[in-house]
Image (cartoon, coloured by chain):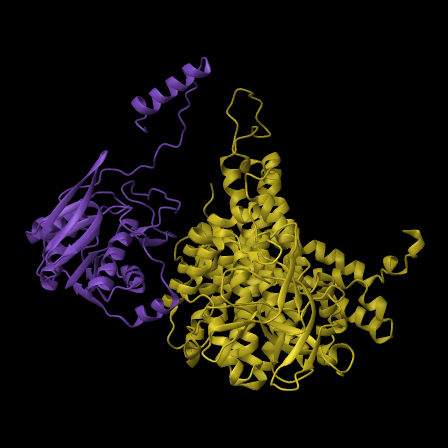
Amino acid sequence: MKVAVLMKRVPDTASVFAVAADGKSVETGGLKYVMSPYDEHAVEEAIRLKEQAGAEVIVLSAGPPETKETLRSALAMGADAAMLVTGAENAGPRGLAKALAAALKRMAPDLVIAGKQAVDDDASQVPERVAELLGIPHASVITRFALSGSVATVDREIEGGSYTLEVPLPALFTTQKGINTPRYPTLPNIMKAKKKEITEVGVAELGLGAGDLAAGMAIESVSLPRQTRLKKIIEGEPAEKVRELVRVLRETEKIL
Amino acid sequence: MSDKLTDMRFIRFLLYEVYNVEELTQYPYHADHSRETFDMAIDAAYQLAREVFWPNYQEFDRNGAQFDGQHVQAPKGMHEIWRHCKEGGWFAPNISFDDGGQQFPMSIFAVTSFLFSCGNTSAAMYVNGTWGAAMLIDKFGSEALKAMYMRKLYAGDWAGTMALTEPDAGTSLGDIKATARKAPDGDYYLISGVKRFISSGDHDLTENIIHPVLARIEGAPAGVKGISLFLVPKFRVNDDGSPGEYNDVATAGIEHKMGLKGQATATLNFGEKGDCRGWLIGEANKGLPYMFELMNRARVFTGIQAVSGASVAYQWALQYARERLQSRDVTCRDVNSPQIPIINHPDVRTMLLKQKAFIEGALGMVLYCAKLADRMANSSDPEECENLNLILEVMTPCCKAHLSNASVESIIQALQCFGGAGYCEEFPVAQLLRDNKVFSIYEGANGIQAMDLLGRKVAMQAGAAVRALMMEIGATLAEAEALPALQDLAQKVQEVQNEVIETTMTLGAVGMSGQIQEYICNATAYLELFSQMLMGWQHLKHAIAAQRALDSETGEAPFYRGKIETARFYANTVLPHAVATARMLKANEYTALHYAEECF
């Protein structure tokens, strides 16, 4: 069985961010890049499948050449091979999905797993678009994955509950936190990863032109979140204060 | 709050932009490596440090190692940390592939050790101690001992210690009393004696614990020349490699310490029942030289531990100073204006920069030493090796003593940034301060390091080590002189270098005249002066790399400008103290030496 994992290289969210001079992008100098954390869950799930059922795990990404470093991290977790699609760096979710789908068509995996969203733009679009382009079923935000023959049984998280679905393969799934705990890279696996192959393929080679990669949207502006803290002091007797606090948390802030 | 333990960007700057560790991959031993494997290893270590070591840090302080009268339990979280280190191969990063390691350079191992130590020093000590015990067997043990013990230690299956200190023999190792009597019917010795302050001395992390023990074979010469090194397992090992019979190594207790409470620092009784077996490592009566070969490395590691605490404290202080609102700008008269983050107050800013300048200079020193060790281990040119060794010898006591003195000072500055909150235990800074103090004491107290520097290293081979070091510093000065923006910095470092040379000659004359006590009585001040020169030199190296990056406009200008300004801050605020210390040293200051005891 062949399992493909979609992975995106994103800035570490612990970095200090600044808006670039053009006002439409983020200053990239000095940023540290990592694998998008939801994708770590996807890689982990694929490797578990490999350990349980002997699957071949290929990690796929589209991005700048430095993405190879991040693909190498997935190889150090235990993936077998990796592929990098180049030339779609500025494509946006629509173009990225086309590039990845074209690569997957060649790869013909039985199963595709991806993180539920990438933590840089939080668009949550690429995996679903890929599934549509490939014409295969997909289930998003899964917290459990089990395989029996060519049917996967998965739990999907919804507000206050969960669905259990049976999905025939080939299919695409996106992982939510809680599905597993991604393993740490080990030194022996880091050394093994170095010897594994990362194939590079350009968008032209996949038969994609500028029209395919058009973003279909334009970014007007980028801004940092507001820093000020909103203060609200609740007055009254302790019992009243608690009631009011619970009401605010539930109705205004929608935290409870 | 802060989940940042250190500045990884700065560590990469040191590794790749200042010390060019990538060039080590041209040696056959490291040929399978590249910047990519180095980066992956340090990223993996930092991830473990943040996600596995650090979450246990405060818990280790509250619920440390426990002793029930017989057995020691390591803190709960230590079991998980050990498991991750074992799975990750972290007991043997630099060891050969054949022995289960991954052949990383010491430069990378030093960084990963630093990161684990940032995460939780007590925990990192269990791991480092095991590596150290294995290294002793690796370097000096017989093939039989290696086969039986070494691989298990490098794999993290078993744990290791170093058992030197006794109740009446700490600094004075020549006075140790533990004895070894050759068994009439076997290849082993019967060991008897008490060892104290043994880090990771007993615990429940592994099924066996291996103690390298210093003891005196019956009839051996008195003093340091009659000490041998033995391998003493907690459980004897069966032919199939499994732990067997109990080897009469009893735990008398664990220490109730000021800090490092997660560390099971034990007193061990060897041979209470007369049946503790030990196997000689290497040759008889050579125990101390063997141990010191490892101790020298351990001393640089103590410097690394010391800086790690300062680094974490600084990161917390920095974040607190950015968030804590208190008072207004000193020129602001409007009492209704909002309070400002305390990082804007000049005194707080100075305290932060003091810490940053210490940490960055100190990390420079230890990584410079690690790279020296790498070059030594790989070079086939004996002359080059000897030269590198001399520089490493003279820098080692400075790494150990200066960094552990100044790290405590640095953490005090961090604690001060927190005001009253720093004195309370909800922030980890008070614990970081308590945990850090021991580094000036163990692995050879700092006073001993100072005597080692002045009495041994400076004097060795008629000053050859100092000369070799001064050549290196001179080369850096020449590089800096060629960059107009750094000439003022270079001059300040050179001034201190000249002071060190003059002071060394003045003191040397005192020593040559036979006034040995006078020669040595200000050794601590001399080490301080010498170390500040080293720190200033390291800062200058950083400034050179930063200036070149700025000149080539590769981006990240604030980062590089920060490096140069940090170097300037160190040169302008610390180096004048070095000059003053030199003046004192040259003035034959012996008041304390001649101070009559009854006047105290």
Residue most extreme to the left: A135
Residue most extreme to the top: A236
Chain in purple?
A
Q: Is residue B422 left or right of residue A236?
A: right
Where residue B298 appears, as percent x and y from the top left, is 60, 67
Chain B as rendered: colour: yellow
Where residue B60 appears, as percent x and y from the top left, is 54, 49
Q: Residue at x 9, y 55 (%)?
A: A169
Q: Residue at x 68, y 76 (%)?
A: B288
The answer to whether residue B117 shows anywhere in this view is yes
Where residue B267 appears, as percent x and y from the top left, is 66, 61
Q: Quadrant of residue B250?
A: bottom right
| Viewer-side residue, B97 vs B391 | B97
Q: Residue at x 70, y 73 (%)?
A: B457
Residue B431, compared with residue B91, is above or below; it is above
Where residue B510 appears, as percent x and y from the top left, is 84, 71
Q: Quadrant of residue B191?
A: bottom right
The answer to whether residue B390 shows anywhere in this view is no
| Viewer-side residue, B323 vs B116 | B116
| Viewer-side residue, A180 vs B576 | A180
The total of numbered circles placed on residues is 0
Q: Quadrant of residue B305?
A: bottom right
